[in-house]
Amino acid sequence: MTAARLDELTSWYADWTGLRVAVLGLSVTGFSVADTLAELGADVLVVTEGADEEYARLLPVIGVRLWTGSLDSVPEELRAFDPEVVVASPGFAPRHPIVSWTRESDIALWGDIELAWRVRDKVVRADGAPADWVLITGTNGKTTTTRLAATMMVAGGLRAVPCGNIGVPVLDAVRDPSGFDVFVVELSSHQLWYLSLQTGPEPLSPHASVCLNLADDHLEWHGSFEGYRDAKATVYAHTRVACVYNKADVATLRMVEEAEVVDGARAIGFDLGTPGPSDLGIVDGLLIDRAFLEDRHKSALELTTLQDLAAHGLAAPHIVANILAAGALARSLGVEPIAIRDALREFRLDPHRIEVVGVAAGVTWVDDSKATNPHAADSSLSAYPGAVWVVGGLLKGVDITDLVAGRGSRVKAVIVIGVDREPIRAAFARHAPEVPLFEVDHAETGEVMARVVELAAEVARDGDVVLLAPAAASFDQFDSYGDRGRKFAAAVQEWIGRGTDGNDTDAPRTGA
């Protein structure tokens, strides 16, 4: 009886009244789920280890019950509630006791993305249809590409909103009364794993989708690289128009080849080389579209130039790749090349993404704290060869050996921070023993960045770059990668203020 009822819940205007739903977690995503379900008339119980004070105050106001306590086992209150659906926040791993209990009990298990897809018709476009969905994932570059694609679409006259893992829950976008033409949805591998469980009669079917790249990350959550890869591949399922893939990363092509898509969906490649028909790429310094035009075998469209991108701090190779991917997504929706060019001239990178935070005595200090895994750090090091490299933190079960083997011998010096320093030491000892290596002890948490800057300043000379590209998570010493980057920038500015005459000092700015 429950399964039949759930199959009917594919619209905001279906009868959700009284549906018993347990919501796991009370982050921004968890609250958006609870708030949405309460508005729909469901009977909602939020189960979480701890609750933000504001959320805890708001839940009873909207008619939602809250249970807090240890989640090492299934709470009796949850069993007694007897949920028909459990909606889990993305942080709950597949082997979490409550997730395992839910699946073993044949209770429907959703993520926030499935719920958002089911109720996507709350506000429709002028033609009466819900907004199109464009899905973006990858080990690195997701947020930048999501923002780029949405910016291009808006410049092209579409009402587009970046949402999902970028910080704005999709459910908040779905319920926005102003309505949108396109949801540009950044998806983490965690969200995609939950989406892979989708069993409803109307599976999520995006207009276009992309996996930007694939490298080791979040292996402790997924249990294996294969599990991580399979979750990422879900992004292409049921795509209707364009499956965008990275020609320089064969894993993304394999995902497209193996995906079940809607008849007529095209594979669209991108990379920094010369594009073939149905690709985007670069020819003589021009970013070229050979995919979305009638005579793509004999002609091409110019989107922008490398020179123009350099003038706006967007010329790092991995950023250019993100621009091509975003351009493909925008072009799949009919955005004109001139709108893409204009959007790029106004676009600025996020903080902590190859952000120049100071220049003094000829030394450039770059914050790429958002490089939280080796793949992202590799991109940073390719943009700044010969840098003094600040690396380390929580490696999340990922092996850094290949990164050090490939890039380590080219850096001027390495400063190792964080709790997982030993694997980095070992990798340098084996693959780049000639590179000067310094360590900042984990016990020095309070002053870690001040010490990093002192060490880097002793090594760096006129013309050098000091690059914070940790290749690791931040939570051993900092609240977030943002906190790590801000503390680095503050330490740089303090050093500049006391250690130079200021004649060569620039204010913090964003650049590539």
Image (tube, helix red, strand yellow):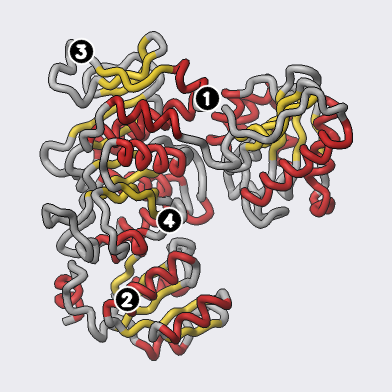
Q: To which quarter of the image does residue 41 belong?
A: bottom left
Q: Give the CA distance from mark 4 to mark 1.
A: 28 Å
Q: Are marks 4 and 2 in contact (CB under 8 Å)?
A: no
* Residue 429 makes an appearance in the image: no
Q: Earlier in the sequence, mark 4 or mark 3?
A: 4
The residue where tag 1 is placed is 316
Mark 4 against mark 1, which lies toward the viewer? 1
Around disc 3, counting alpha carbons within 10 Å, would you say few (fewer than 14), some (14 to 19), or many (20 or more)? few
Q: Is 14 located above or below residue 249 in the figure?
A: below
Residue positioned 81% across, 20% down in the render: 461
Q: Is residue 253 left or right of residue 496?
A: left
* Upstream in sequence: badge 4 or badge 2: 2
Work out how far the residue at label 4 is from the one at label 2, CA to CA, in angstroms: 21 Å
Q: Amino acid at mark 4?
A: His
Label placed on residue 125: none
The image's mark for residue 37 is: 2
Earlier along the polypeptide chain: callout 1 or callout 2? Answer: 2
